[in-house]
Image (cartoon, coloured by chain):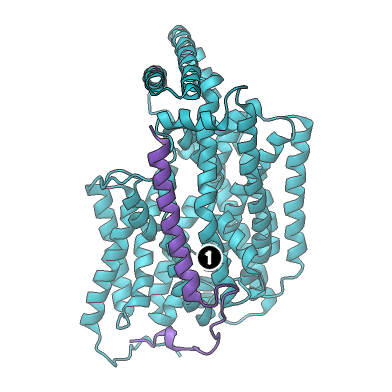
Amino acid sequence: MRAADWIVVILYFAYVIREGFRHGRKNADLNDYFRGKQSLRWWAVGLSVMATQASAITYIGTTGQAYGSGMTFIQFYFSQPVVMVVLCMTFVPFFYRANVFTAYEYLERRFDAKTRSLTSFLFLMSRGLSVSIVLYAPAIVLGVIFGWSEITTVLVMGLSTILYTAIGGNKAVIMIDAKQMILMFAGIFVALGLLVRKFPSGVSLGDAIHIAGVTRKWTTVDLSLDLNKPYTLLSGMLGGFFLLLSYFGCDQSQVQRYLAGRSLRESRMSLIFSAFLKIPMQFLILSIGVLMFVFYQFEKPPLNFNQAYHDLLVSKAPAEYAGLEQEYDAAFKERRDAALALERAGASGQPDLITEAERRYLAAHGALESLKGKNRDLLRRVMGNEPSAEVNYVFPSFLLRYAPAGVLGIMLAVIFAAAMSSFASEINSLASATIIDFYKRYFRQEASDSHYLWTSRAATLFWGIVATTAACFAGKLGSLIEAVNRVGSYFYGPILGVFLLAFLVRRSNGAGAFWGLLAGEAAVFFVAYNTSISWLYYNVVGAAAVLLAGTLISFSTSFPGQVSPERHG
Amino acid sequence: MKPDPRDEEKDVDREEPPPFLGSWQRVYATVVIYTVVVILALYVMTLRLNR
């Protein structure tokens, strides 16, 4: 890190904290604190929706994923525009007209208090347990790459975000998210520009596209019907649809964004805005990974992007690792020559030459990949367990080595912005569900605005500290954190099922919703532990099971015109 | 059975038209057509650029 990079990063932190204090002065009651007075314009809410969705892993992990296996991940987002249309037609007007603070509040009006409480509780548990990952995942990567301790990185991100979120409330979160999202967009173009400039002379963008095409890095649509493959057109349009519908329609961290819109029109427009931008944005982010792949055809990539693994092998298996590095150097030179020959053959335009150059290149690429596999086997042997994925280290490692002074600072600020915008929205939404669905509902139904404002700030502080503390110790919890995160994803489908039951089945009732939700959870756990289908389909299973069980139970426990004894005035 | 909140307060927020295209139905149709066009374009790109 050079002085210019430090200045950029320090200016970024100073700005977001100052913004939090500026908005915090205007909060007077719960409507101000959790819904930003419902005064926000569509572009600010739309950018906040996108910033909440994009975590640091979006920048660090997916670029590395594209570097290794190409663009197939983009299919996960194919259903997002359609999801936004469904939300605009159903969820958003229902929530807006019901004038709720949380999505789960709607369920009490539609069903009963126990369905609301159970759904909100599931949200608090799943989101509360997984929110630490938002801080921990980038901290572990930045820690290794920049030589910072994980705890220092977690504390810097966590405490500054808690400060501006607890003081500023939802309006501060949304306005800061919007600016952070603009920074993130700028970061994408800075990274792409940097990569193209770093290509060796004589290698054009067209050559880069050709080289990536030979290794099928541009696969963006996979028509396979294999349910075990995670990223296909089918999994994106079906599994992705249910997951994203649940995330945007039933997860308070997103619902709270668009409930802050100035009007129903502004809220709808914010989602339409995101519908148009998400796929192109993800395309550009993944393109960074593909262009990095091309860049590393001409510049030798490290055998281990994770410096800690390199150091480990140097100390624990020096002779074997040195031999592997020698083979790797030779294999890289052969692939670089093959890539240059491919570029020359492309320029000649002769099909025979091109085919021959492609064959040579693919053989050299395969040899290099096989050495990476050997390196992984060696790591596994030395560590005694499975090494973590390399994908998260590719982009930060590239930035550290090749970004000029100031640009590294900007890209670091982008990664911090991505992590902090998601973290802020999540602790803000955890606080709103805690206060609105439990504290105000069960413990203190009448109190002054000032009382609720300060308890809301305390709840934000509480969830922020819990998540930051968990992130500090996440390294020691290891597989437990991973398990919690995985299990957390089991709740999305059933929660969506309850809302679909509310919207689609007019005769559904509280008993159907409550027991249907439990039946949906049981179905998801059963499928997860007894089949090998991709996790994206769990959401379909969960939502369908709740709809089916909830409808059957509702129809068997109520008759048209019957009024539930649980009805609240 | 509880009253459906959809039946309540229907007049609270009258349908405001979107800032472009005149009606929400047209906006939604545009988004769906856009999605189909983007996926088709990416499919063509997959076929053309992958060798």
Q: How crowded is mark 1: few (under 14 residues within 10 Å), some or many (20 or more)?
A: many
Quarter assignment of residue A556 = bottom left
Left or right of A431 on screen, residue A476: left
Instruction: Please give left or right for residue A439 compared with residue A13 in the image.
Output: left
Q: In which quarter of the image is residue A456?
A: bottom right
The image position of residue A120, as x and y in percent, is: 45, 67
Note whether residue A485 is visible.
Answer: no
Between A217 and A547, the residue placed more toward the observer is A217
- Residue at coordinates 72% horizontally, 59% vertically from top-left? A20
Residue in the picture at 24% in, 88% down: A559
Between residues A464 and A400, which one lies in front from this camera angle? A400
Q: Mark 1 points at which residue?
A: A272
In the rendered image, which quarter contains the N terminus of chain A?
top right
Residue A55 position in % (x across, y down): 55, 48
Q: Horizontal and vertical percent for residue A390?
A: 47, 30
Q: Which chain is cyan?
A: A
Seen at 40% across and 41% down, the residue is: B46
Tell me the chain of label 1.
Answer: A
Q: Which amino acid does label 1 sit on?
A: Ile
> In the rendering, at what x and y percent does residue A249 appear?
45, 66
Determine whether A353 is above or below A543 in the image: above
Q: Which of A563 and A406 is in front in this view?
A: A406
Furthest toward the bottom, the residue is A561
Q: Seen in the image, is A98 located left or right of residue A158?
A: left
Asked whether residue A439 appears in the rendered view, the answer is yes
Query: A556 and A36: which one is in front?
Result: A36
Q: Colour of chain B?
A: purple
- Rendered view: A424 above or below A359: below
Q: Is mark 1 on a helix, strand or loop?
A: helix
